[in-house]
Amino acid sequence: MSLWEERAGRNEALFREVNERIEELHAARSGEEIAEFVCECADDACSERIPVPLRVYEQVRSDPRRFIIHPGHQRSELEQVVETAERFLVVEKHGAAGRVAAATDPRQ
């Protein structure tokens, strides 16, 4: 695994952890069906916010190799797009990035 791949995987894992806390906050509120999550792309300078239905977020989180990103932020050397929505993409990490994603899953 290259240093860049490892760093990208760690950045994505950090953004995923932030989104886990965002989901917890929204879950505490009754009636909230959509939350604004941070983009989980490999770019550590990215600050895009993405509105995602909580049920979709839960579906994505069922696979530790899947992440929610802003359209155009995908990196074919790290991931493949598995779902396309109007305001976000769901990508699945492969190779070294997939192994880092699985190893850093906060729900394990």
Image: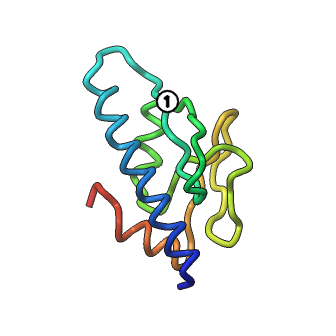
Identify the residue at the far right of this view: 72
Is 45 placed left or right of 106 in the picture?
A: right
Q: Is residue 18 left or right of residue 5?
A: left
Q: Which amino acid, by three-letter code, is at mark 1? A: Glu
| Position in image of residue 70 (x %, y %) | 65, 43
Q: Residue at x 48, y 36 (%)?
A: 37
The answer to whether 84 appears left or right of 104 in the picture is right
**Picture coordinates of residue 33 (x, y %)?**
43, 22
Q: Position of residue 62 (x, y in %)?
A: 39, 52
Q: Read off the residue under disc 1.
A: 36
Q: Position of residue 84 (x, y in %)?
A: 68, 44
> SS for tag 1?
strand
Residue at 69% over, 63% down: 75
Image quadrant where residue 86 sits: top right
**Residue nearer the viewer, 21 or 90:** 21
User: In the depicted view, which residue is nearer to us: 21 or 95?
Assistant: 21
The total number of labels drawn is: 1
Residue nearer the viewer, 43 or 95: 43
